[in-house]
Amino acid sequence: MPSIQVRDLPEHIYHALKVAAKHARRSLSQQAIISLAKGLDIPVAYQKRREIVLLEIEKNESRLKGLSQLDITVFIREDRDR
């Protein structure tokens, strides 16, 4: 996932972001993402993303159940083939 660094952020914006994060029980990074998305009028679909991630986890768990012994080379080879 891409990242961003903001230089010379005005103190009052940093403070407002920090306060908003505390009230929403989010990290400063999470709050910055939410604030940017709202400012750009982009919906943040965390629930849909969470569902996709959980389905991926379930899929991988079902693959692991079929293996009697965990062979890490299978996963390394699969990753290299991507």
Image (cartoon, rainbow, N blue to C red):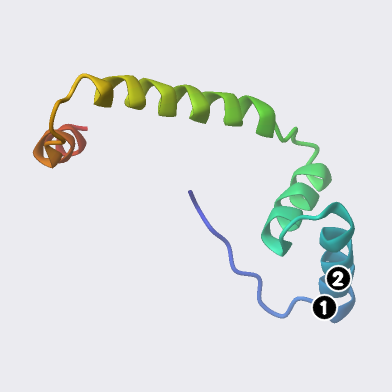
Could you tell me which secondary element the residue under label 1 belongs to? loop
At 87% from the left edge and 74% from the top edge, which residue is drawn? Answer: 15
Circle 1 crowding by C-alpha within 10 Å: few under 14, some 14–19, many from 20: few
Image location of residue 55, percent across then percent down: 48, 22
Give the x, y percent position of residue 37. Answer: 75, 44
- Picture quadrant where residue 60 is located: top left
Q: Which mark is residue 10?
A: 1
Give the residue at mark 2. Answer: 13
Quadrant position of residue 79: top left
Q: CA distance from mark 2 to mark 1?
A: 5 Å
Residue 59 in the figure: left or right of residue 33:
left
Q: Is residue 2 above or below residue 11?
A: above
| Residue depicted at 89% across the width and 66% down the height | 19
Residue contact at pointers 2 and 1, CB within 8 angstroms: yes
Quadrant containing the C terminus is top left
Question: In the figure, is residue 61 to the left or right of 78?
Answer: right
Inspect the image, locate mark 1, and give the three-letter code of the amino acid beneath it. Answer: Pro
